[in-house]
Amino acid sequence: MFVSIRGRVLINVEALNMTESVGNYVKHRRVPVISPTTYATYFVPAISGESIAHGFQEVLAGEAKKKGLPVCKLCEKGIFLKSTNENVFKGAFGQNPPKDDFEFEKTVIGNCLVEDVGGFLYAHGGRNVKRTSNFYTGYMIPTKESLENVVIEPQLHSRYALGTPSDIMKEQGQMIYYVELSSAVYTFSFDLDTRYVGKATFVCDKAGEDVVNDRKERIETTLEAMQRFLIEFAFGAKKTRFLPIVEWESLVIAVSDDVWTVPSPFSGNYIEKTEKKKEKVNYNTKLFVYPKDGEFEEVVANAIEEAKSRL
Ligand SMILES: [Zn+2]
């Protein structure tokens, strides 16, 4: 089963994905984007796929714990080192990495839903074991119409308080700092392919083999995590003091029996394109469209229900 999500979301005054700080100046992530009408390149604010993936995996770890499904000691704390090397493996699973590659992947999948769904990469002492993520996401960028108008604005903040005794303020002085904020209608993309959840992938002749006996629960939990993640907009940084103003403009969720992705939401007519695509290519594809089909939460819930019914 394949779930594809595309949307457009208006986010005002956000600092969801910051890159380096230069002194007291914290920069928003920027990426080059080409205008499809003029081919001019714009450096625009963006939110990375890594940032979105981190948020999703945190929700997934939480949902898995609630359901009593396994999550390793690192992923349950939101530390997604994901079996990077021997020490990480030992720290996560409390055992030495198995010598056999199939056993290695089986151990990770069996003991951590986050790495089952989100993949891992072990690279230690010349040995590599890899599992590709079963979910896909990428950069959120300003939509085509907002490309030329989007701005990044540094906002000045100060912790200085008048009347503070000088001996207290001596070392720090007036701690002014700048945080770059942005506002834009952003694209959103997220896909889930459930084909290999709970199954081996790395060793050729074992690929596709079930290595757990709770595959259905694992996929159900992943779908529930997706629902929660979307409804709570559960990703991005700096939300304690730069909580953005978020309004979904539109969202399409396609549930299919095979790989079927919703066209890019960069263009305003993407819902129309999605419907046309469905007329031509269709793997028992069912579309759930916000706002056409109801309230946001309702559309998401209905899509997740449909996905669960296909397990
Ligand atoms: Zn883990």
Image (cartoon, rainbow, N blue to C red):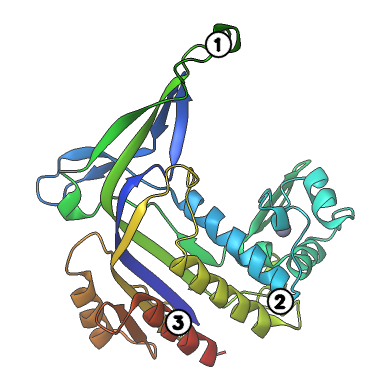
Element type at marker 2?
Answer: helix
Above-or-below relation of 118 to 237: below
Q: Residue at x 50, y 11 (%)?
A: 173
Mark 2–mark 1 distance (CA, rounded to whole Å): 53 Å
Amino acid at dot 3: Ala
Name the image quarter holding residue 214.
Answer: bottom right
Residue 214 located left or right of residue 269 = right
Quarter of the rendered structure image containing ligand 1: bottom right
Location of mark 3 (residue): 301
**Residue 94: which disc?**
none
Give residue 219's position: percent from left, percent from top.
61, 79
Amino acid at dot 2: Lys
Amino acid at dot 1: Pro
Give residue 237's position: percent from left, percent from top.
49, 45
Label 3 vs 2, first from the N-terminus: 2
**Residue 67: which disc?**
2
Give residue 213's position: percent from left, percent from top.
76, 83
Q: Please rate how many residues cluster around mark 2, counting C-alpha atoms within 10 Å: few if below 14, some from 14 to 19, many from 20.
A: few
Give residue 74's position: percent from left, percent from top.
74, 52
Q: Nearer the viewer, residue 97 or 274?
A: 274
Residue 73 located left or right of residue 20 = right
Element type at marker 1?
Answer: loop
Mark 3–mark 2 distance (CA, rounded to whole Å): 19 Å
Q: Residue at x 58, y 9 (%)?
A: 171
Q: Please rate how many residues cluster around mark 1, counting C-alpha atoms within 10 Å: few if below 14, some from 14 to 19, many from 20.
A: few
Location of mark 1 (residue): 165
Answer whether labels 2 and 1 touch (C-beta < 8 Å). Answer: no
Quarter of the picture containing the C terminus is: bottom right
Element type at marker 3?
Answer: helix
